[in-house]
Image (cartoon, helix red, strand yellow):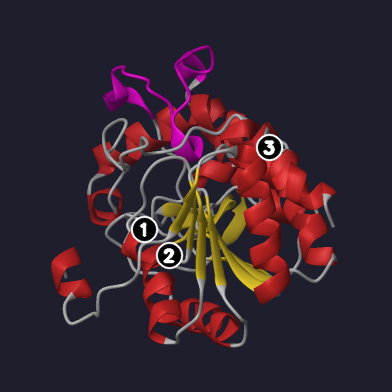
Amino acid sequence: MTQPELLAGRTEAPEPHRVIDPVEAAEALLSFLQQHGPLTLLTGAGISTDSGIPDYRDGAGAWKRKQPVQHLDFMQDPATRQRYWARSLVGWPVMQQAQPNAAHEALTRLQQAGLIGTVITQNVDRLHQRAGTRNVIDLHGRADEVLCMSCGYRCPRVDVHDRCSELNPDFRDFTAATAPDGDADLEADFTRFRVADCPQCAGVLKPDVVYFGDNVPRERVNQARQALENSAGLLVIGSSLMVFSGFRFCRYAEQAGLPIALLNRGRTRADDMATLKLDCAIGPVLGRVAGGI
């Protein structure tokens, strides 16, 4: 379904109140939270960049690099899996060692103050949970666990990386620029890379993450939608909302007549749905908000 089709038939929304000054943005967001909280929160990659995890898109919503691995390619093409796991030996430690940043910690304080309820995150890094945030729905799964696509075997991702490292000692010392979600901009001869298969059935092991081209489990979507319907509004932080799996919650909020606030650098797909648009750096704004409660 295309964006024009998604928005067809919608009455023209008023222009959102747009703020670019961080101090004014913090004041506006705190007022929004106090008026409408507890809000459902939807977060994207932009909230984790200060933890050293790269994001996918620029301020205009365009891809910064090649699109991530596609689900069908990963499942059907052994060469794609070789490339994926070889690059992950370089990229995954960055995500594994990442720590919650000031924005994650500020959101935990806002939740404890009763201004934020359920957190729906498009991120797979589990940094919200590590910062102490509760009631988190990992919309796209979690990158720290691996699942066998045949028998359901599950294990920590680090176990698979240890096995891949043992099978491929020549790949242990490669270095490359870090890419989003445990990937790396590594180019090499991947044909000689030996992939670690399921130790129980020799099936395909895949991080427990919803790849591009796959669908978010229906029960997870329903849980998130129920949380939104039981709240007084939606706050989106650090997401361009170009992926429908997150954008759908803005549609749900709009259909329910709930106010929407956006905190993101650059444009988002839901700009014309928002009551409040804050085009600012995320960390400083959230720090001021949390300090004002």
Instruction: Calculate the distance from the C-alpha at mark 3 to the C-alpha at mark 2.
Output: 21 Å
Residue 35 in percent (x, y) is at 68, 73
State the residue at coordinates (31%, 44%).
Answer: 69
Quarter of the image for residue 36 reads bottom right
Residue 111 in percent (x, y) is at 77, 65
Residue 54 in percent (x, y) is at 49, 32
**Image quadrant for the C terminus?**
bottom right
| Vertical comparison of 62 with 216: above or below | above
Q: Amino acid at mark 1?
A: Asp
What SS does tag 3 mark? helix
Instruction: Calculate the distance from the C-alpha at mark 3 to the C-alpha at mark 1.
Output: 21 Å
The magenta span reads: 169-193
What SS does tag 1 mark? helix
Quarter of the image for residue 177 reads top left
Question: 184 or 103: which is nearer to us?
Answer: 103
Which residue is the site of mark 1? 271
What is the number of callouts on the image? 3
Q: Which mark is residue 274?
A: 2
Answer with left or right where residue 276 lies relative to residue 186.
right
Q: Are marks 1 and 2 in contact (CB under 8 Å)?
A: yes
Q: Which mark is residue 284?
A: 3
Q: Are marks 3 and 2 in contact (CB under 8 Å)?
A: no
What SS does tag 2 mark? loop
Instruction: Calculate the distance from the C-alpha at mark 1 to the C-alpha at mark 2.
Output: 5 Å
Residue 159 makes an appearance in the image: no
Q: Amino acid at mark 2?
A: Ala
Residue 226 in percent (x, y) is at 55, 86
Mark 3 surroundings: few (<14), some (14-19) or many (≥20) residues within 10 A = some
